[in-house]
Amino acid sequence: MSALAVEHPPLSGDDWDSAVALWKGTGAPKGCKVEIIEGIVTVAPPPVNDHNLIADLVQQRLYSVVPDGWGVFQTLNVAIPSRDGLYVPDLAVVPRKAIPRGENFTPADVAELVVEITSRSNAVHDRVAKLNGYATAGIPLYLLIDPHATGSPTIHLYGEPSDGAYRVLWAGKFGEAVPIPAPFDLALDTFSFPRP
């Protein structure tokens, strides 16, 4: 199954509220990921098990190093209105007290790290639109795990956002250890990541 896109004109001012209302009202099947990417409401099917296994392995390792009072969240809605985006990263590391209570989404600037694991149907969103969106929002670290990269599965760690762009901090393949810097100071072993 591929991602479904619902066209929406470029957003500004009240248009953002309209897009969020459309996003909230999307009657997507249970388990689907509903996001706003560059002003377009998208619906993607639930991820396959290999995707979930990678997310679980990363989440377990992150829990061993996150500071007290922080969480590693799945399905946290992260708003980036300046990029007409409301993303649902596979994992987001956020101080718990920074998450607005009773809200549908969290401002992107409270996240310290976001992790995206590509799916065949929406890999280009993770590689391009979300890369730019997270950098624009100033999220310090973006970990892109790409099992569907051409050739063999790859991993990129981006950081030091400036003027809406990231610097590549590390690039490698499944089986290598990803050095995730402070405040995590983690060598993320990727040897056991399932390959498609």
Image (cartoon, grey):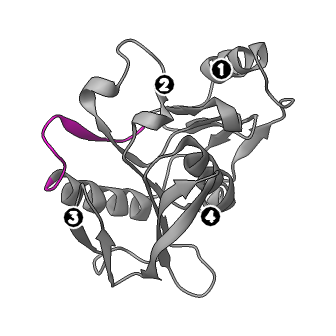
Question: Is there a contact, CB below 8 Å, between mark 4 and mark 1?
Answer: no
Q: Mark 4 or mark 3, which is nearer the start of the sequence?
A: 4
CA distance for labels 4 and 1: 26 Å
Q: Give the residue drawn at x 54%, y 67%.
A: 167
Magenta stretch: give its range. Answer: 64-75
Q: Position of residue 53 (x, y in %)?
A: 33, 61
CA distance for labels 3 and 1: 36 Å
In the displayed structure image, the side of residue 28 where residue 182 appears, left or right? left
**Helix, strand or loop for disc 4:** loop
Disc 3 residue type (three-letter): Asp
Disc 4 residue type (three-letter): Arg
Question: Is there a contact, CB below 8 Å, between mark 3 and mark 1?
Answer: no
Residue 177 falls within the magenta-colored stretch: no
Q: Disc number at residue 105?
A: 2
Q: Please, which residue is most extreme toward the front here?
A: 163
**Helix, strand or loop for disc 3:** loop
Q: Is residue 122 above or below residue 13?
A: below
Q: Mark 2 or mark 1, which is nearer the start of the sequence?
A: 1
Q: Disc number at residue 64?
A: none
Disc 1 residue type (three-letter): Val
Instruction: Judge by depth and name the residue closer to the eye, 54 or 164.
Output: 164
CA distance for labels 2 and 4: 26 Å
Residue identified by numbered label 4: 120
Instruction: Judge by depth and name the residue closer to the eye, 141 or 92.
Output: 141
Q: Disc number at residue 185?
A: 3
Please identify the quarter of the rendering in which residue 111 is found.
top left
